[in-house]
Amino acid sequence: MTKPQKTRITPEEQAELARALLDALNPLASAVRARATGQPEHRMWDGDPADVALSVLAAWKVVDAEVKRLTEIAAGTAGGYGASYEQLGAAWGITRQGARKKWPDAVPRPSASAPAPVILELFDGEAELIQDAVTGHWTWTAQAADGSRGLPAPDATPCTSREEAAAYAGAYLREFAASRA
């Protein structure tokens, strides 16, 4: 059984996190309030205190949705790299079943056919990492931010791990992201 990770933070870390989140939230809350009232953002705190507080609450809802989206991505990434639902649950402080319910597609299901490709998003591009079901070797294809498509050279040595294929694909995506700047 996987032991839960210790994710408690110190009171100082919690205070710093709260400051950072509030600093990040203020521009969003101002924009939400400005759209709701038609007032300029610098007048966010003008008006009925309940309306101002509701604008802040609405901004926190946006943050909450984004945290959930990013959490799903992190769970899927961990699952794509071989983490089990038991491990995901331990990291989140829930059961294996709770993790499976929360992130139903995070851990690839085993199959007799070729494993599902792994998607890697870097430098505004995307790469697909594919494992050959027979040899176990990994290869990649990529579409970089500038629209160029890449794959290993025909005479390239096969990648023996997902990480190796990811490194080649990531280097390709980085190279062609930089060329568009």
Image (cartoon, rainbow, N blue to C red):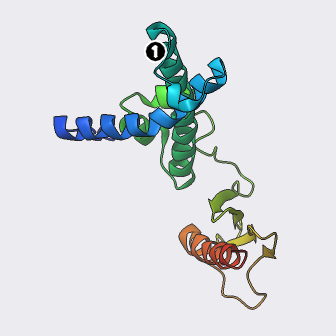
Q: Decide if residue 24 is in sight here.
A: yes
Percent position of residue 176, x then y:
71, 77
Q: Which amino acid does label 1 sit on?
A: Ala
Which residue is nearer to you in this view: 46 or 140?
46
Q: In which quarter of the image is the N terminus?
A: top left
Q: Decide if residue 97 is in sight here.
A: no
At x 81%, y 74%, the residue is 148
Query: How many numbered discs sit on the rendered protein?
Result: 1
Report the residue that reaches farthest toward the bottom. 155
At x 61%, y 23%, the residue is 39
Percent position of residue 90, x then y:
36, 36
In the rendered image, the vertical position of residue 85 relative to residue 113, given as above or below:
above
At x 56%, y 71%, the residue is 161
* Quarter where residue 119 is shown: bottom right
User: Which class describes the residues within 10 Å of circle 1: few (<14), some (14-19), or many (20+)?
Assistant: some
Percent position of residue 12, x then y:
18, 39
In the rendered image, the vertical position of residue 167 relative to residue 69, given as above or below:
below
Q: In which quarter of the image is the C terminus?
A: bottom right
In the rendered image, the vertical position of residue 103 relative to residue 174, given as above or below:
above
Q: Please indicate whether residue 24 sits to the left or right of residue 61 in the image.
A: left
* Quarter where residue 152 is shown: bottom right
List the residue tagged with mark 1.
Answer: 53
Q: Please indicate whether residue 65 sits to the left or right of residue 126 in the image.
A: left
Q: Please indicate whether residue 22 sits to the left or right of residue 163 in the image.
A: left
Tag 1, which secondary structure? Answer: helix
